[in-house]
Image (cartoon, coloured by chain):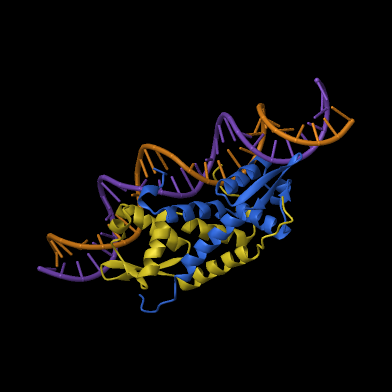
Chain colours: A yellow, B blue, C orange, D purple
Amino acid sequence: MGITKTEIFTDEQNKLAVQLKAIAHPARIAILQLIIEAKACICGDLSSELGLAQPTVSQHLKELKNAGLIQGTIEGVSVCYCIEPEAWQNLNDELNKLFSSYKDFNNCC
Amino acid sequence: MGITKTEIFTDEQNKLAVQLKAIAHPARIAILQLIIEAKACICGDLSSELGLAQPTVSQHLKELKNAGLIQGTIEGVSVCYCIEPEAWQNLNDELNKLFSSYKDFNNCC
DNA sequence: TTAATTAATCGTAATATTGCAATATAATTA
DNA sequence: TAATTATATTGCAATATTACGATTAATTAA
């Protein structure tokens, strides 16, 4: 069907899946890295930096924004994008929870 | 096009995206949690546990296996699935790298 | 107001994903 | 060998994603 049966999973599982899906694309990983490396908000011109057309970049930014991971602020003619600190921290926490719950066990196949 | 332009991104970005995509689904998150909580490999019968049909679960397991995140061992009639420790650790490291590189900066929009 | 600049939206084509019924394969047991 | 059990594969329908050209806002500058 192409549609995920979200109703059979917990809110936590669904939310984590949505946020992971948002960052599960090389272009969006690259965008996040650019913002982080800049140590500030980033204003415009990502399309030449990324090698993707302007509408494509705009769409990727929109998806990151929809997932709440970045925020955009109108700055004159251009738009500046930042990490959304709370959501970023929250995703970090959820992932830490998932990864730290695993201890290498050797009573295994 | 529906096809990601992987050639314009780094191998690291592409690999991270592939592994994140593998875990970016609530059913696959649930599967990983079940394996981790069991503190051992898990053998069969996930379809009733998850509420998805057997072929659907099999497909999700395949995707996790393709991403290298779990491994399956034939155990008599059934198949046992484990976390693949190296890949799991590697993904953990890559995510830590991404998240730790961000420090909340307030010289921002 | 008009022109220029920048980002978002629309529309569309190509491909991928999700889910499952039906079927096939593999291993054990009688 | 035949029956049983457990998992994988196939095929398909519905929906989602990726990418971009064309166009449309929105803001500033002339």
Q: At which x and y percent is residue B65?
A: 59, 47
Quadrant that contains the N terminus of chain B: top left
Q: At which x and y percent is residue C3?
A: 12, 60
Q: At which x and y percent is residue B76?
A: 76, 40
Q: Is residue B72 left or right of residue A40?
A: right
Q: Is residue B93 left or right of residue A41?
A: right
Location of residue C8 (image quadrant): bottom left
Image position of A62 with respect to B45: above or below: below
Residue at 65% from the left image edge and 45% from the top image edge: B57
In depth, the one of B50 and A24 nearer the eye is: A24
Image position of A84 with respect to A57: above or below: below
Q: Is residue B5 visible?
A: no
Location of residue B77 (image quadrant): top right
In depth, the one of B53 and A28 nearer the eye is: A28
Q: At which x and y percent is residue A104?
A: 67, 60
Residue at 43% from the left image edge and 63% from the top image edge: A65
Q: Is residue C30 left or right of residue B46?
A: right
Quadrant that contains the C terminus of chain B: bottom left
